[in-house]
Image: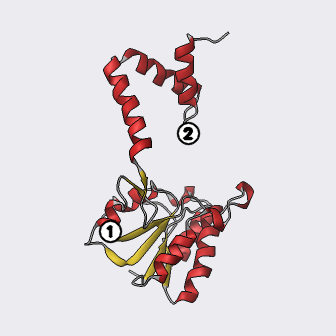
Amino acid sequence: MPDFAEPLERVIQQFKRLPGIGQKSAQRLAFHVLRTSREDAARLAEALLDVKDNLGICAECNNISDAELCPYCRDSNRDRSQVCVVEEPHNIVGIEITRQFFGLYHVLHGSLSPLRAIGPEQLKIKSLLQRIGSGGVEEVILATSPNVEGEATAVYLSKLLKPLGLKVTRIAMGVPVGSDLEFADEVTMWKALEGRREL
């Protein structure tokens, strides 16, 4: 016998399917929806369906877009000679908030992971090579995650791209600003030393 009325239990189960949402969080969200007005619940449902019905993938970079091209690819002021490769669309936000990168992006939609049966053919690598083949790209910045899968993806892409005569760079990694060196692990310190620069 469920702990809650069947409609509420269904909402809880749906919230639990979301990443990072456990039983308690799902219950809090479900009770919040229950307390809100019907209009608020309808707006939430409409927004969820709108995302599914009206968003797609950019034809050029694979970012999420509400048109054929995403806002970055449509922007004629962006530097088309630089392409920053990221794993997922939400990774772009972290780069954009710095206001230091003015090039374009390419979203792979994942990273290489033999354990999860994700190989090069499951990623958007072919379209990256096609973009580069059409000319104009001088530098590819590999901004994959600093974990085993991200590193494997960066190494794989580097081996594919360097023979094409491009400048291939990797984002720097190491000790985060505001942290203490005594808490840095061995790999973080190694990456920080490896990526050091002259002042």
* x and y percentages locating residue 60 in the rendered image: 42, 67
* x and y percentages locating residue 88 in the rendered image: 50, 57
User: Going by the picture, which residue comes out furthest to the left?
Assistant: 77
Q: Local crowd at mark 2 within 10 Å, few (<14), some, or many (≥20)?
A: few
Residue at x 58%, y 88% (from the top left corner): 163
Q: Which amino acid does label 2 sit on?
A: Pro
| Residue 186 visible | no
Please report contact status of discs 1 and 2: CB closer than 8 Å, yes or no.
no
* x and y percentages locating residue 169 in the rendered image: 49, 78
Mark 2, residue position: 19
| Residue 94 drawn above or below residue 162 | above
User: Going by the picture, which residue comes out furthest to the right?
Assistant: 115
Mark 1, residue position: 100
Q: Which amino acid does label 1 sit on?
A: Gln
Q: Local crowd at mark 1 within 10 Å, few (<14), some, or many (≥20)?
A: few
**Nearer to me, 107 or 60:** 60
Residue at x 52%, y 22% (from the top left corner): 11
